Amino acid sequence: DSGKMKRAEPQKQNYFSFILSVDIGTTSIRCHVYDKVASIRGSCTTKVEILYPQVGYVEMNPDAIWNGFIRVVKGAVQDAGIQMHQIEALGISTQRGTFTTWDRKTGVPFHNLISWQDQRAAELVKAWNRSCTLKVIHGVMKLVYFLSRQKRCLAASLIVFSTQHVTMRLIWVLTHYKQAVSEGNCFFGTIDTWLLFKLTKGRLHATDYSNASSTGIFDSYQMCWSQLLCSMVSLPLSIFPKVEDTGCEFGCTDPSIFGVPIPIMSLVDQQAAMFGECCFNPGDVKITMGTGTFMDINTGCKPHTSVAGLYPLVGWKIGSEVVYLAEGNAADTGTAINWAQKLELFTDVQDTSAMAYSVPDSDGVCFVPSFSGLQAPLNDPKACASFMGLKPTTTKCHLVRAILESVSFRNMQLYDTMHRETNIPITKIRVDGGVSANNFVMQLTADLFGRKLSRMQHHEMSCLGAAFVAGLGVGFWRSREELKKLHSTDDVFVPRGSPKAGARIPNGEYIPVFQSWERALRRSMNWYGKT
Protein backbone atom coordinates (compact mmCIF):
# COMPACT_ATOMS: atom_id res chain seq x y z
CA ASP A 1 0.00 0.00 0.00
CA SER A 2 1.69 3.19 -1.14
CA GLY A 3 -0.81 5.38 0.74
CA LYS A 4 -3.68 7.42 -0.54
CA MET A 5 -2.58 10.11 -2.96
CA LYS A 6 -4.62 13.12 -3.96
CA ARG A 7 -3.46 15.41 -6.71
CA ALA A 8 -3.58 19.06 -5.69
CA GLU A 9 -5.05 21.66 -8.03
CA PRO A 10 -2.37 22.96 -10.40
CA GLN A 11 -0.94 26.33 -9.38
CA LYS A 12 -0.54 29.26 -11.75
CA GLN A 13 2.86 30.13 -10.30
CA ASN A 14 5.84 28.12 -11.39
CA TYR A 15 8.09 27.83 -8.34
CA PHE A 16 11.23 25.77 -8.37
CA SER A 17 11.66 25.02 -4.66
CA PHE A 18 9.30 23.70 -2.00
CA ILE A 19 8.95 22.75 1.65
CA LEU A 20 8.02 19.24 2.77
CA SER A 21 6.05 18.76 5.97
CA VAL A 22 5.05 15.50 7.67
CA ASP A 23 2.57 15.16 10.54
CA ILE A 24 2.65 11.88 12.47
CA GLY A 25 -0.70 11.62 14.20
CA THR A 26 -2.43 8.94 16.22
CA THR A 27 -4.32 7.46 13.27
CA SER A 28 -2.41 8.61 10.18
CA ILE A 29 0.82 9.97 8.74
CA ARG A 30 0.30 12.89 6.36
CA CYS A 31 2.79 14.65 4.12
CA HIS A 32 2.24 17.85 2.15
CA VAL A 33 4.43 19.73 -0.33
CA TYR A 34 4.05 23.51 0.16
CA ASP A 35 4.98 26.24 -2.30
CA LYS A 36 5.93 29.88 -1.61
CA VAL A 37 2.32 30.96 -0.96
CA ALA A 38 1.74 27.99 1.40
CA SER A 39 -0.50 26.21 -1.09
CA ILE A 40 -0.40 22.42 -1.09
CA ARG A 41 1.15 21.15 -4.32
CA GLY A 42 1.15 17.45 -3.50
CA SER A 43 0.01 15.15 -0.69
CA CYS A 44 0.20 11.57 0.51
CA THR A 45 -1.39 9.87 3.51
CA THR A 46 -1.06 6.45 5.07
CA LYS A 47 -2.78 4.92 8.08
CA VAL A 48 -1.13 4.18 11.41
CA GLU A 49 -1.87 0.75 12.81
CA ILE A 50 -2.57 0.85 16.54
CA LEU A 51 -1.59 -2.31 18.45
CA TYR A 52 -3.34 -3.53 21.61
CA PRO A 53 -1.19 -6.45 22.88
CA GLN A 54 -2.88 -6.47 26.31
CA VAL A 55 -5.73 -4.67 28.04
CA GLY A 56 -4.62 -1.06 28.60
CA TYR A 57 -1.56 -1.39 26.34
CA VAL A 58 -1.53 0.91 23.28
CA GLU A 59 1.45 0.62 20.94
CA MET A 60 2.75 1.30 17.44
CA ASN A 61 5.43 -0.54 15.53
CA PRO A 62 8.43 1.86 15.22
CA ASP A 63 9.58 0.27 11.95
CA ALA A 64 6.07 0.65 10.52
CA ILE A 65 6.12 4.35 11.46
CA TRP A 66 9.53 4.72 9.79
CA ASN A 67 8.40 2.94 6.62
CA GLY A 68 5.16 4.93 6.54
CA PHE A 69 7.15 8.15 6.92
CA ILE A 70 9.38 7.31 3.96
CA ARG A 71 6.35 6.23 1.91
CA VAL A 72 4.38 9.46 2.37
CA VAL A 73 7.41 11.68 1.71
CA LYS A 74 8.15 9.97 -1.60
CA GLY A 75 4.44 9.80 -2.44
CA ALA A 76 3.85 13.52 -1.82
CA VAL A 77 6.87 14.51 -3.93
CA GLN A 78 5.65 12.24 -6.73
CA ASP A 79 2.13 13.66 -6.37
CA ALA A 80 3.50 17.21 -6.74
CA GLY A 81 5.33 16.22 -9.93
CA ILE A 82 8.67 17.49 -8.65
CA GLN A 83 12.09 16.06 -7.76
CA MET A 84 13.70 15.64 -4.34
CA HIS A 85 16.43 18.17 -5.15
CA GLN A 86 13.69 20.85 -5.28
CA ILE A 87 12.91 20.35 -1.58
CA GLU A 88 14.47 23.10 0.54
CA ALA A 89 13.69 21.60 3.97
CA LEU A 90 11.70 18.95 5.79
CA GLY A 91 9.48 19.90 8.74
CA ILE A 92 8.23 17.20 11.11
CA SER A 93 5.26 17.46 13.48
CA THR A 94 4.54 14.56 15.83
CA GLN A 95 2.01 13.46 18.42
CA ARG A 96 3.10 14.05 21.99
CA GLY A 97 4.06 11.62 24.71
CA THR A 98 4.62 8.57 22.47
CA PHE A 99 8.13 7.11 22.82
CA THR A 100 10.43 4.15 22.45
CA THR A 101 13.92 3.13 23.59
CA TRP A 102 16.58 1.51 21.41
CA ASP A 103 20.10 0.13 21.26
CA ARG A 104 22.34 3.12 20.58
CA LYS A 105 24.87 0.95 18.70
CA THR A 106 22.60 -1.07 16.43
CA GLY A 107 19.59 1.29 16.30
CA VAL A 108 17.26 -1.64 17.01
CA PRO A 109 14.27 -0.72 19.25
CA PHE A 110 13.93 -2.62 22.52
CA HIS A 111 10.12 -2.45 22.24
CA ASN A 112 7.26 -0.90 20.29
CA LEU A 113 6.42 2.78 20.50
CA ILE A 114 4.31 3.22 23.64
CA SER A 115 1.43 5.57 22.87
CA TRP A 116 0.33 8.56 24.93
CA GLN A 117 -2.97 6.65 25.34
CA ASP A 118 -1.25 3.68 27.02
CA GLN A 119 -2.37 2.83 30.57
CA ARG A 120 0.24 0.22 31.59
CA ALA A 121 1.69 2.57 34.21
CA ALA A 122 -1.68 3.52 35.76
CA GLU A 123 -1.01 1.68 39.04
CA LEU A 124 2.50 3.15 39.21
CA VAL A 125 1.02 6.63 38.73
CA LYS A 126 -1.48 6.07 41.56
CA ALA A 127 1.23 4.76 43.87
CA TRP A 128 3.53 7.71 43.25
CA ASN A 129 0.77 10.30 43.59
CA ARG A 130 -0.11 8.80 47.01
CA SER A 131 3.50 8.31 48.09
CA CYS A 132 5.09 9.92 51.13
CA THR A 133 8.00 10.98 48.90
CA LEU A 134 5.76 13.16 46.75
CA LYS A 135 3.99 14.60 49.80
CA VAL A 136 7.33 15.57 51.32
CA ILE A 137 8.46 17.18 48.03
CA HIS A 138 5.19 19.12 47.85
CA GLY A 139 5.63 20.36 51.41
CA VAL A 140 9.27 21.33 51.01
CA MET A 141 8.65 23.14 47.73
CA LYS A 142 5.67 25.05 49.18
CA LEU A 143 7.95 26.25 51.97
CA VAL A 144 10.72 27.19 49.52
CA TYR A 145 8.18 29.04 47.37
CA PHE A 146 6.89 30.92 50.46
CA LEU A 147 10.44 32.03 51.23
CA SER A 148 11.72 32.68 47.69
CA ARG A 149 8.59 33.41 45.64
CA GLN A 150 10.19 31.58 42.72
CA LYS A 151 7.49 30.22 40.43
CA ARG A 152 9.43 27.08 39.56
CA CYS A 153 9.26 26.12 43.25
CA LEU A 154 5.49 26.59 43.17
CA ALA A 155 5.38 24.41 40.05
CA ALA A 156 7.39 21.69 41.83
CA SER A 157 4.97 21.85 44.78
CA LEU A 158 2.10 21.03 42.42
CA ILE A 159 3.68 18.08 40.57
CA VAL A 160 1.37 15.13 40.04
CA PHE A 161 2.00 12.25 37.67
CA SER A 162 -0.26 11.28 34.79
CA THR A 163 -0.30 8.33 32.40
CA GLN A 164 -0.28 10.82 29.51
CA HIS A 165 3.15 12.07 30.60
CA VAL A 166 6.11 9.94 29.63
CA THR A 167 7.63 9.66 33.13
CA MET A 168 5.94 6.62 34.63
CA ARG A 169 5.67 4.71 31.35
CA LEU A 170 9.40 5.20 30.88
CA ILE A 171 10.11 3.92 34.42
CA TRP A 172 8.01 0.86 33.62
CA VAL A 173 10.07 0.25 30.45
CA LEU A 174 13.47 0.73 32.05
CA THR A 175 12.77 -1.88 34.74
CA HIS A 176 12.69 -4.39 31.86
CA TYR A 177 15.95 -3.22 30.22
CA LYS A 178 18.24 -2.62 33.20
CA GLN A 179 21.31 -4.17 31.55
CA ALA A 180 21.22 -1.88 28.50
CA VAL A 181 20.85 1.14 30.78
CA SER A 182 23.65 0.06 33.11
CA GLU A 183 25.95 -0.50 30.11
CA GLY A 184 25.16 2.98 28.74
CA ASN A 185 23.70 1.42 25.62
CA CYS A 186 20.14 2.76 25.79
CA PHE A 187 18.65 5.74 23.98
CA PHE A 188 15.23 7.20 24.80
CA GLY A 189 13.23 9.30 22.40
CA THR A 190 9.79 10.49 21.36
CA ILE A 191 8.72 9.90 17.75
CA ASP A 192 10.64 12.91 16.43
CA THR A 193 13.87 11.70 18.07
CA TRP A 194 13.42 8.20 16.67
CA LEU A 195 12.87 9.57 13.16
CA LEU A 196 15.84 11.97 13.40
CA PHE A 197 18.05 9.06 14.48
CA LYS A 198 16.87 7.02 11.49
CA LEU A 199 17.03 9.90 8.99
CA THR A 200 20.64 10.66 9.92
CA LYS A 201 21.71 7.00 10.08
CA GLY A 202 22.36 7.22 13.82
CA ARG A 203 24.38 10.44 13.81
CA LEU A 204 21.76 12.45 15.70
CA HIS A 205 20.06 11.82 19.06
CA ALA A 206 18.09 15.04 19.56
CA THR A 207 14.72 16.66 20.11
CA ASP A 208 13.46 20.25 20.22
CA TYR A 209 12.18 22.24 23.20
CA SER A 210 8.50 21.89 22.30
CA ASN A 211 8.73 18.08 22.25
CA ALA A 212 10.86 17.93 25.41
CA SER A 213 8.50 20.17 27.40
CA SER A 214 5.54 17.93 26.49
CA THR A 215 7.03 14.81 28.12
CA GLY A 216 6.49 15.84 31.74
CA ILE A 217 10.23 15.27 32.44
CA PHE A 218 11.44 18.70 31.28
CA ASP A 219 11.92 21.75 33.52
CA SER A 220 10.42 24.61 31.52
CA TYR A 221 11.80 27.14 34.02
CA GLN A 222 15.42 25.94 33.79
CA MET A 223 15.06 24.86 30.14
CA CYS A 224 16.64 21.44 30.68
CA TRP A 225 15.72 17.89 31.62
CA SER A 226 14.55 18.01 35.24
CA GLN A 227 17.35 16.77 37.48
CA LEU A 228 14.98 16.88 40.47
CA LEU A 229 12.42 14.65 38.80
CA CYS A 230 14.98 12.29 37.28
CA SER A 231 16.74 11.79 40.62
CA MET A 232 13.41 11.37 42.42
CA VAL A 233 12.23 8.54 40.15
CA SER A 234 15.70 7.16 39.20
CA LEU A 235 15.76 8.08 35.50
CA PRO A 236 19.35 8.24 34.13
CA LEU A 237 20.01 11.52 32.28
CA SER A 238 22.39 9.65 29.93
CA ILE A 239 19.48 8.16 27.97
CA PHE A 240 17.88 11.52 27.09
CA PRO A 241 18.38 13.27 23.74
CA LYS A 242 20.06 16.62 23.36
CA VAL A 243 17.54 19.47 23.22
CA GLU A 244 17.88 21.85 20.27
CA ASP A 245 16.16 25.06 19.20
CA THR A 246 12.91 24.84 17.28
CA GLY A 247 13.62 25.98 13.74
CA CYS A 248 17.30 25.08 14.21
CA GLU A 249 18.58 22.76 11.50
CA PHE A 250 19.05 19.49 13.37
CA GLY A 251 21.08 18.14 10.49
CA CYS A 252 20.37 16.75 7.06
CA THR A 253 18.86 13.49 5.97
CA ASP A 254 21.46 10.96 4.94
CA PRO A 255 21.84 11.25 1.12
CA SER A 256 21.20 7.52 0.72
CA ILE A 257 17.58 7.90 1.95
CA PHE A 258 16.12 10.42 -0.52
CA GLY A 259 19.02 10.78 -2.94
CA VAL A 260 19.93 14.24 -1.67
CA PRO A 261 20.56 15.68 1.83
CA ILE A 262 17.52 17.63 3.10
CA PRO A 263 17.67 19.91 6.18
CA ILE A 264 15.37 18.68 8.99
CA MET A 265 13.43 20.69 11.58
CA SER A 266 10.88 19.46 14.09
CA LEU A 267 8.28 20.46 16.69
CA VAL A 268 5.32 18.83 18.41
CA ASP A 269 1.72 18.87 17.10
CA GLN A 270 -0.15 21.41 19.27
CA GLN A 271 2.76 23.84 19.29
CA ALA A 272 3.05 23.34 15.54
CA ALA A 273 -0.65 24.17 15.15
CA MET A 274 -0.09 27.30 17.26
CA PHE A 275 2.75 28.34 14.94
CA GLY A 276 0.68 27.48 11.89
CA GLU A 277 -2.10 29.76 13.18
CA CYS A 278 0.51 32.55 13.50
CA CYS A 279 -0.28 32.97 17.21
CA PHE A 280 3.06 34.67 17.79
CA ASN A 281 2.11 37.29 20.40
CA PRO A 282 1.14 37.12 24.10
CA GLY A 283 -2.62 36.75 24.41
CA ASP A 284 -3.05 34.90 21.11
CA VAL A 285 -5.24 31.82 21.61
CA LYS A 286 -5.46 28.68 19.48
CA ILE A 287 -8.21 26.09 19.91
CA THR A 288 -7.84 22.72 18.19
CA MET A 289 -11.03 20.65 18.29
CA GLY A 290 -10.30 17.12 17.13
CA THR A 291 -10.52 13.87 19.07
CA GLY A 292 -10.04 16.14 22.08
CA THR A 293 -9.93 19.89 22.50
CA PHE A 294 -6.59 21.63 23.09
CA MET A 295 -6.75 25.29 24.04
CA ASP A 296 -3.42 27.13 24.13
CA ILE A 297 -2.60 30.72 25.02
CA ASN A 298 0.69 32.42 24.23
CA THR A 299 2.02 33.57 27.63
CA GLY A 300 5.07 35.32 26.20
CA CYS A 301 8.55 34.94 27.67
CA LYS A 302 7.47 33.40 31.01
CA PRO A 303 5.95 30.00 31.79
CA HIS A 304 2.59 30.03 33.57
CA THR A 305 2.27 28.25 36.90
CA SER A 306 -1.26 26.91 37.25
CA VAL A 307 -3.27 25.65 40.23
CA ALA A 308 -6.23 24.60 38.07
CA GLY A 309 -4.60 22.11 35.72
CA LEU A 310 -3.33 24.30 32.87
CA TYR A 311 -0.05 22.85 31.62
CA PRO A 312 3.00 25.09 31.02
CA LEU A 313 4.72 24.29 27.74
CA VAL A 314 7.54 25.66 25.66
CA GLY A 315 5.84 26.78 22.47
CA TRP A 316 9.11 27.20 20.58
CA LYS A 317 12.65 28.45 21.07
CA ILE A 318 14.18 30.21 18.11
CA GLY A 319 17.57 31.72 18.84
CA SER A 320 17.40 33.63 22.12
CA GLU A 321 13.60 33.98 21.95
CA VAL A 322 11.59 31.53 24.06
CA VAL A 323 7.80 31.54 23.76
CA TYR A 324 5.73 29.75 26.39
CA LEU A 325 2.18 28.46 26.23
CA ALA A 326 -0.39 27.50 28.85
CA GLU A 327 -2.63 24.64 27.74
CA GLY A 328 -5.91 23.21 28.89
CA ASN A 329 -7.55 20.21 27.28
CA ALA A 330 -10.81 18.28 27.15
CA ALA A 331 -10.27 14.68 26.09
CA ASP A 332 -13.62 13.74 24.55
CA THR A 333 -14.66 16.22 21.88
CA GLY A 334 -14.63 14.26 18.63
CA THR A 335 -14.92 11.08 20.71
CA ALA A 336 -18.40 12.11 21.90
CA ILE A 337 -19.57 12.95 18.38
CA ASN A 338 -18.22 9.68 16.95
CA TRP A 339 -19.94 7.76 19.77
CA ALA A 340 -23.25 9.42 18.92
CA GLN A 341 -22.79 8.45 15.27
CA LYS A 342 -22.20 4.81 16.24
CA LEU A 343 -25.49 4.94 18.16
CA GLU A 344 -27.11 6.11 14.90
CA LEU A 345 -28.30 9.42 16.32
CA PHE A 346 -27.27 10.72 12.90
CA THR A 347 -25.83 9.28 9.68
CA ASP A 348 -23.49 12.02 8.50
CA VAL A 349 -21.57 14.19 10.96
CA GLN A 350 -22.24 17.16 8.65
CA ASP A 351 -25.94 16.87 9.53
CA THR A 352 -25.41 17.55 13.23
CA SER A 353 -25.37 21.35 13.01
CA ALA A 354 -28.70 21.43 11.13
CA MET A 355 -30.19 18.93 13.61
CA ALA A 356 -29.18 21.12 16.55
CA TYR A 357 -30.65 24.22 14.93
CA SER A 358 -33.90 22.38 14.11
CA VAL A 359 -34.98 22.56 17.79
CA PRO A 360 -35.10 25.74 19.92
CA ASP A 361 -33.22 24.10 22.81
CA SER A 362 -32.16 20.69 24.14
CA ASP A 363 -35.47 20.22 26.01
CA GLY A 364 -33.60 20.31 29.32
CA VAL A 365 -31.26 17.46 28.35
CA CYS A 366 -27.63 17.75 29.44
CA PHE A 367 -24.73 15.63 28.18
CA VAL A 368 -21.47 15.24 30.11
CA PRO A 369 -18.58 14.40 27.68
CA SER A 370 -16.25 12.54 30.03
CA PHE A 371 -15.49 9.10 28.60
CA SER A 372 -11.89 9.72 29.72
CA GLY A 373 -12.71 11.62 32.89
CA LEU A 374 -12.63 15.40 33.22
CA GLN A 375 -9.52 17.48 32.69
CA ALA A 376 -8.90 21.14 33.66
CA PRO A 377 -10.30 22.84 35.62
CA LEU A 378 -12.09 19.93 37.37
CA ASN A 379 -9.36 17.31 36.98
CA ASP A 380 -11.46 14.28 37.91
CA PRO A 381 -10.32 11.02 36.25
CA LYS A 382 -13.23 9.16 37.90
CA ALA A 383 -16.02 11.19 36.25
CA CYS A 384 -18.43 9.33 33.96
CA ALA A 385 -20.07 10.31 30.68
CA SER A 386 -23.83 10.75 31.03
CA PHE A 387 -27.12 12.06 29.70
CA MET A 388 -29.37 13.76 32.25
CA GLY A 389 -32.82 15.28 32.01
CA LEU A 390 -34.26 12.79 29.51
CA LYS A 391 -38.04 13.01 28.98
CA PRO A 392 -40.69 11.26 26.84
CA THR A 393 -40.52 14.36 24.59
CA THR A 394 -36.78 13.99 23.99
CA THR A 395 -35.87 13.43 20.33
CA LYS A 396 -32.64 12.62 18.50
CA CYS A 397 -32.29 16.31 17.67
CA HIS A 398 -32.41 17.21 21.36
CA LEU A 399 -29.73 14.61 22.12
CA VAL A 400 -27.50 15.84 19.31
CA ARG A 401 -27.95 19.46 20.41
CA ALA A 402 -27.06 18.50 24.00
CA ILE A 403 -23.85 16.80 22.80
CA LEU A 404 -22.79 19.79 20.70
CA GLU A 405 -23.65 22.17 23.55
CA SER A 406 -21.42 20.14 25.87
CA VAL A 407 -18.47 20.66 23.52
CA SER A 408 -19.00 24.43 23.66
CA PHE A 409 -19.56 24.35 27.42
CA ARG A 410 -16.24 22.57 27.96
CA ASN A 411 -14.66 25.21 25.70
CA MET A 412 -16.17 27.84 27.98
CA GLN A 413 -14.76 26.19 31.10
CA LEU A 414 -11.27 26.08 29.61
CA TYR A 415 -11.52 29.65 28.34
CA ASP A 416 -12.81 30.94 31.67
CA THR A 417 -10.00 29.16 33.55
CA MET A 418 -7.36 30.41 31.10
CA HIS A 419 -8.66 33.98 31.18
CA ARG A 420 -8.87 34.05 34.98
CA GLU A 421 -5.56 32.29 35.73
CA THR A 422 -3.20 33.86 33.23
CA ASN A 423 -4.62 37.37 33.54
CA ILE A 424 -3.35 38.05 30.02
CA PRO A 425 -5.56 40.19 27.72
CA ILE A 426 -6.69 37.92 24.90
CA THR A 427 -5.89 39.40 21.51
CA LYS A 428 -7.29 36.90 19.01
CA ILE A 429 -8.79 33.40 18.96
CA ARG A 430 -8.22 31.03 16.05
CA VAL A 431 -9.85 27.63 15.77
CA ASP A 432 -8.94 24.52 13.78
CA GLY A 433 -9.52 20.76 13.86
CA GLY A 434 -12.26 18.56 12.43
CA VAL A 435 -14.97 19.58 14.92
CA SER A 436 -14.41 23.26 14.07
CA ALA A 437 -16.28 22.53 10.80
CA ASN A 438 -19.49 22.39 12.90
CA ASN A 439 -21.12 25.81 12.66
CA PHE A 440 -23.38 25.26 15.69
CA VAL A 441 -20.38 24.56 17.96
CA MET A 442 -18.45 27.51 16.53
CA GLN A 443 -21.32 29.99 16.91
CA LEU A 444 -22.26 28.87 20.41
CA THR A 445 -18.61 29.03 21.50
CA ALA A 446 -18.38 32.59 20.14
CA ASP A 447 -21.59 33.48 22.01
CA LEU A 448 -20.32 32.00 25.28
CA PHE A 449 -16.91 33.68 25.00
CA GLY A 450 -18.38 36.98 23.84
CA ARG A 451 -15.44 37.03 21.42
CA LYS A 452 -14.92 36.75 17.68
CA LEU A 453 -13.60 33.37 16.51
CA SER A 454 -11.69 32.85 13.27
CA ARG A 455 -11.79 29.50 11.51
CA MET A 456 -8.99 29.01 9.03
CA GLN A 457 -9.12 27.55 5.53
CA HIS A 458 -6.19 25.27 6.31
CA HIS A 459 -7.49 22.43 8.47
CA GLU A 460 -4.18 20.61 9.03
CA MET A 461 -2.49 23.33 11.03
CA SER A 462 0.15 21.07 12.62
CA CYS A 463 1.49 20.22 9.17
CA LEU A 464 1.41 23.88 8.12
CA GLY A 465 3.15 24.97 11.33
CA ALA A 466 5.97 22.47 10.81
CA ALA A 467 6.31 23.74 7.24
CA PHE A 468 6.45 27.37 8.47
CA VAL A 469 9.18 26.55 11.01
CA ALA A 470 11.23 24.63 8.43
CA GLY A 471 10.75 27.33 5.80
CA LEU A 472 11.85 30.10 8.16
CA GLY A 473 14.84 28.03 9.23
CA VAL A 474 16.27 27.84 5.70
CA GLY A 475 15.13 31.28 4.50
CA PHE A 476 12.36 29.95 2.23
CA TRP A 477 10.15 32.48 4.04
CA ARG A 478 11.91 35.52 5.42
CA SER A 479 9.81 36.62 8.39
CA ARG A 480 6.73 35.92 10.48
CA GLU A 481 5.06 38.94 8.94
CA GLU A 482 5.37 37.21 5.58
CA LEU A 483 3.73 34.11 7.09
CA LYS A 484 0.81 36.16 8.42
CA LYS A 485 0.12 37.43 4.90
CA LEU A 486 -0.19 33.84 3.67
CA HIS A 487 -3.15 33.20 5.97
CA SER A 488 -6.68 33.11 4.62
CA THR A 489 -9.64 32.99 7.00
CA ASP A 490 -12.48 30.67 6.07
CA ASP A 491 -15.18 32.04 8.39
CA VAL A 492 -15.53 34.50 11.25
CA PHE A 493 -18.07 33.84 13.99
CA VAL A 494 -19.26 36.95 15.84
CA PRO A 495 -21.06 36.65 19.21
CA ARG A 496 -24.83 37.19 19.09
CA GLY A 497 -27.24 38.42 21.75
CA SER A 498 -27.05 41.33 24.14
CA PRO A 499 -24.18 41.22 26.65
CA LYS A 500 -25.11 40.95 30.31
CA ALA A 501 -23.02 43.22 32.52
CA GLY A 502 -20.79 41.37 34.96
CA ALA A 503 -22.01 37.94 33.87
CA ARG A 504 -19.59 35.04 33.57
CA ILE A 505 -21.23 34.26 30.21
CA PRO A 506 -21.67 37.41 28.05
CA ASN A 507 -24.71 35.98 26.25
CA GLY A 508 -27.33 36.00 29.01
CA GLU A 509 -29.64 33.62 27.12
CA TYR A 510 -27.40 30.66 27.89
CA ILE A 511 -26.70 31.31 31.57
CA PRO A 512 -29.47 29.00 32.94
CA VAL A 513 -28.63 26.27 30.38
CA PHE A 514 -24.94 26.41 31.32
CA GLN A 515 -25.81 26.31 35.04
CA SER A 516 -27.98 23.21 34.50
CA TRP A 517 -25.13 21.57 32.62
CA GLU A 518 -22.71 22.37 35.46
CA ARG A 519 -25.09 20.65 37.89
CA ALA A 520 -25.10 17.56 35.66
CA LEU A 521 -21.31 17.76 35.54
CA ARG A 522 -21.01 17.74 39.33
CA ARG A 523 -23.31 14.71 39.59
CA SER A 524 -21.11 12.82 37.11
CA MET A 525 -17.94 13.47 39.08
CA ASN A 526 -16.24 10.75 41.15
CA TRP A 527 -18.72 8.23 39.71
CA TYR A 528 -16.21 5.41 39.44
CA GLY A 529 -14.98 6.11 42.95
CA LYS A 530 -18.36 5.27 44.46
CA THR A 531 -19.10 1.87 45.97
Image: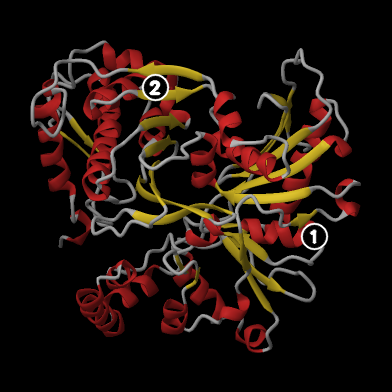
Mark 2 near mark 1, Cβ–Cβ under 8 Å? Answer: no
Q: Image point 88% across, 33% down: which residue?
A: 83
The image quadrant where one finds the C terminus is bottom left
C-alpha gap between disc 2 and disc 1:
42 Å
Placement of 267 over or under 341, stated as above or below: below
Compared across the picture, whether 369 is left or right of 296 comes to left
Q: Secondary structure at mark 1?
A: loop
Q: Which of the two discs, 2 and 1, labels the residue nearer the N terminus?
A: 1
Compared across the picture, whether 183 is left or right of 316 comes to right
Q: Position of residue 138 (x, y in %)?
A: 26, 77
Would residue 86 be seen by someone viewing this image from the given angle? yes
Please give the residue where the numbered disc 1 appears in the rendered image: 200
Please give the residue where the numbered disc 2 appears in the rendered image: 438
The image quadrant where one finds the N terminus is top right
In terms of depth relative to the viewer, which is nearer, 281 or 431?
281
Compared across the picture, whether 389 is left or right of 55 comes to left
Q: Image point 82% across, 63% down: which residue?
A: 201
Q: Position of residue 276 (x, y in %)?
A: 54, 36
In terms of depth relative to the viewer, which is nearer, 474 or 431?
474
